[in-house]
Structure formats: structure tokens, C-alpha cells
Amino acid sequence: MPLIPFLNMFGRLLLVALIILALSAGLFSGVNSVRERDWKEQFATPLMDWLAVSPHPQVSYPWLDALYGLRLVPVGEMTLDPVAEERLSYGQVVTTTESLGVHVLRLANSGDIIDVTFRDLYRDVSEATALLVLTHLNDVLPQDRAIAMDSLSDEFNVAIQPVTGVADIPDGPTLERLVERGLAFVQLEKSDPAQVYLRLNDGAVVRMAMPEPFHAMAWPVILLVFCVAAAIAGFFLFLLLRDVDQNLRAVESVAVRIARGELNARVDSRRGLLVRRLGRTFNSMAEHIQRLVEVQREMIHAVSHELRTPVARIRFGVQMIEDCPDEDSRQKQLAGIDGDIQELDELIDEILTYARLEQGGPIMHLQEANVADIARQVVDEQQRLRPDMQFSAEFIGDSESWALSDVEPRYIHRALQNLVGNAGRYAAGRVRVRCRFDEQNCRVDVEDDGPGIPESDWEKVFTAFARLDDSRTRTSGGYGLGLSIVRRILYWHGGQAFVTRSADLGGAAFSLVWPRRQGENGA
């Protein structure tokens, strides 16, 4: 996968992850802040309700002032927000957190506001409740303690039970604190509910089980955060997939249009990064298909035209055989028919070669071959076919030392053969093959001293079945496919073919240029 689309996708996913993390953390913190405040007020409510109905809590429980800063403040002397004042007027407990601890407020029956400060709300409220329970249990007779325990349990929302069995006796450190203070707060883990052991005046031990402390990681909160995170992730995934789906649908619509015959339909390659490469590849395929269809149409039209003449001559020759007066005339007609069949065979070979090169290219078996030897071989072959012409091969500088190139020898031979053969047909008497090889490229120029090609037709000559209006006409031979085959051979070698005018000989100069080393991506 290319780096830029990967970084783009990675950046989007990272941004989504950060957004989900931030929103989840904010939601978790916000929900827990509300839950914790509600838990603090609910947890302190039994204690504060007990103090609210007490006529004189500071007198009845003097240790509350010493331990927890119990104050009775007139309503007008305490600055509170309207919501807190309204809640206090309804008899609710209000908590505020400051640097010294948690202030717990409750409107007493006397009309004053009870203000108690707890540094550690869970532990301090538990111990304060235990002290109140201890005070009242010491005031009742032993035979009435069971009833008092049940009543106090309901009042303070705790479970008070006497310690009677050996298994219920606390450990050594707890017993030491119990003996020293008269109570011992026990909580093994912060998330576990605490137990407070009380030692009465007569030596009896009572255990008070407190409600569970606040749990930030409660499963409803975790479920809520998970659902919200999943919803956010699903939303962003929907947006991402919608963008991909829209781009893929655009490619699909273009494919449908092409299937309906709109061969010029193309994908907008400027769309999203994820399908940009697909769009470019699809457009390249569409252009190739369009070109192949056009080539097929041209070939069908041209082939039908090219086949008509030799077939007509063959039909005429067959008819003439019936009217031949002697054997010599018959043999002459048969020789003409044989020549027409040979022409058809050559035309079909040219058409098949061109079609194979045009429709996706042949299977190239590149190998290291000496292009100089191929050029000499072609020149020698043409010299034997046309002994009255002068064919020569020239090598510029130290070209022969760089003659080894990665090519398909058979097709390079065919390209040079077509050029040198064409030059021999149109030259006045001389054809020259000049080779320029270096470390990077191979170049072969085929020049003749014929009439040349007008500059306006330099590109037209490489078109299949092209005919020029000068001396290069049908009377000179050929079917108009040779140069098209040459250009396609050079295309599959990663090079190009073009035509100019020879500065020395004055005729046409055809040039072939391709890279010496194709590498992994060659051909």
C-alpha cells in the first residue's frame, strides 16, 4: 500500500480513536462526578437526619465538634446557591467539596444549618455513626440491646450484630484498636464494605456492617461508556465506508456505462485517496479497451478491403483457366493464382502479428542479445535479396562494446527487417543502418536515398494500413502494417519509433530507441 493513503487512513483512525477516548473519558468523569455526589449525600443522610432531629447535637455529642467540626449556622449567615438552599429547605442533604474535606449540610429542626466536615467521607461517617451507636447502646440495659440494635440499624441503614462466635472475633491488631479507642474501623480493600467493631462498657463487642463505598467502575457506567464509544466508532466508520462506497459506486457506474457502449466514459481520478489508484488503473484499462475496439474496427474494415483484391484475382484466374487454349497459358494462370495465394498468406501473417502486438502484446522472453549481430544479419539478408542495392551497417564510436541488450531477439529482428526491407523498396541505390549504443540506450537509424516522406505524414506512416500519396504506394509492395508492427515492438520494449529525413542520404530516416537494460519492469 502506498505511504500517503496509509498515512491518511492511519491519521483518520488515530483521530477517531482520540475523539472516542476523549469523549469516553469526559463521559466517564461527568457521570461519576454526579454519581459520587449523589452517593455522598445518600451515604451521609442517615447520620445527618439523626443529628437534625436531635435537640442539641453539640451538647448531646460533644465529640462531633472536636472530631468533625460540627457547627450550627443560622440560615442567613451561610452563603449558598439557590439550588442548595432549596434542597436544604426540602430536608435534603447537600455536600460541597473543599480543600479541608467534604462539607455535609442539613437543615435542623431548630432552623439552623448543621455543617459537618469529613476529611475521608466514608471512614469518618462510618466512625461517627459507630460512636452514636456506641453511645446509645451503652445507655440501654443488656436485655434491651437486641431491640435497640434493630432500631439503630434501621435508623442508620447499617447492620448491627453482637459478636458471639469465635469465628466473628477480629484479629489481633483490630482487638488492640478496639481496646484503646472503643471502636475499630476495618476495611481490607478500598472497594470492600467496611466493618466497625464497638466495645461496650460491659465488655461486649458489637459489629456494625456499613454499606458499600462508592464504585467508580460500576458496570452500568462501563456499559454506558462502551455503548457511547461503540456508537461514536460506528458513526465514524459509517462516514468512512460511505466515502469509500460512493467512490466505488462511481467506478461501478462508469463500468456500466462502458458495458452499454460508452467507451469514452472515465472515472474521476481526483476522488478519495482510497480509490484514486483504482480509478487511474480503471481509466487506463478503459483507454486500452477503447483503443483495442477502435483497432479492431479499423482492422475489420482494412482487412476486408485488402482481401478483396487478391481474392478477386484468384476468382478471375480460376475462371480464366477454363478458357486457356494450351498448357502454357494454364500454367501461367496457375502461377498467378499461386502468387495471389502467397500474397494472402503474407497478408494474414502480417495481420496476425499486428493483432498479437496490438492486443496486449506478446509473451516477451527477454534475454541478453547482441543487437549489433542482429543488425548485421538483417543487412546481409537484404543484400542477398537485392544484390543491385548497397546495404551497409555502421557503428558509431565504441557502440559495439555496448551492443548487449535485454531484448526479444526475434521481434527486434522483425522490426529491423521491416525497416530495412521498406528502405530497400524505396531507395534509389543505397540503404545505411547506423547503430549508436551506450550504457543507457540503444538507437538504430535506417536511412535511404529515396524520395523520403513529407513531414506532414511522419506520424501517419505508423498507422495500420496507412497509404501515402507519393512514391510509397501499393505498387511498391506491402500492406501498410510493417511500420505499425515496428512501433508496437518498440512499445513492448519500453522504447519508441519515429521517422525524420536523412541529412546525408536525403531520403527517409527511421529511428528505433529503447533502453539497454529493461530491469524488473521492462517490456
Image: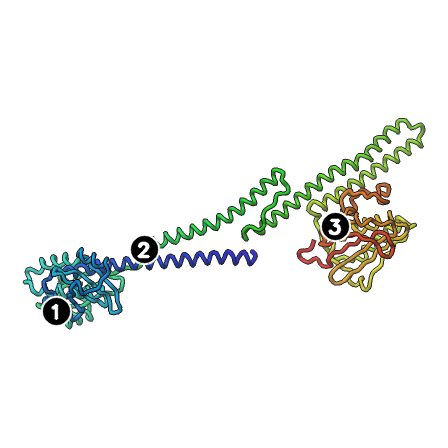
- Residue at 64%, 48% (x, y): give it: 284
- How far is disc 1 from disc 3 in space, using C-alphas? 109 Å
Q: Residue at x 20, y 56 (%)?
A: 86
Dot 2 lies on which element? helix
* Cα–Cα span, label 1 and label 2: 41 Å
Residue 62 image label: 1
The quadrant in which residue 99 appears is bottom left
**Which residue is depicted at the point 36% across and 54% down?**
226
Residue appearing at x 66%, y 57% in the figure: 520
Name the residue type under label 3. Ile
Q: Is residue 243 above or below residue 69?
A: above
Amino acid identity at mark 1: Pro
Residue 159 visible within the image = no
Mark 2 vs mark 3: give the one in front.
2
Q: Earlier in the sequence, mark 1 or mark 2?
A: 1
Q: In terms of image quadrants, where is residue 479?
A: top right
Left or right side of 305 for 283: left
Measured in 3D between alpha carbons, the distance from the residue under mark 2 to the one under mark 3, in whole angstroms, is: 71 Å
* Residue 443 percent coordinates (x, y): 78, 57
Instruction: Give the structural element (helix, strand or loop) at label 1.
Output: helix
| Residue holding disc 2 | 221
How packed mark 2 is, by other alpha carbons closer than 10 Å (few <14, some 14-19, many 20 or more), is some
Viewer-proximal residue among 328 and 443: 443
Nearest the camera: 270 or 349? Answer: 270
Disc 3 residue crowd, few under 14, some 14–19, many 20+, Cα 10 Å? many
Q: Earlier in the sequence, mark 1 or mark 3?
A: 1
- Asked if the residue under mark 3 is in contact with the one under mark 2, i.e. CB atoms within 8 Å, the reply is no
Q: Position of residue 178 (x, y in %)?
A: 16, 69
User: Residue tagged by mark 3?
Assistant: 489
Amino acid type at circle 2 is Val
**Element type at marker 3?**
helix
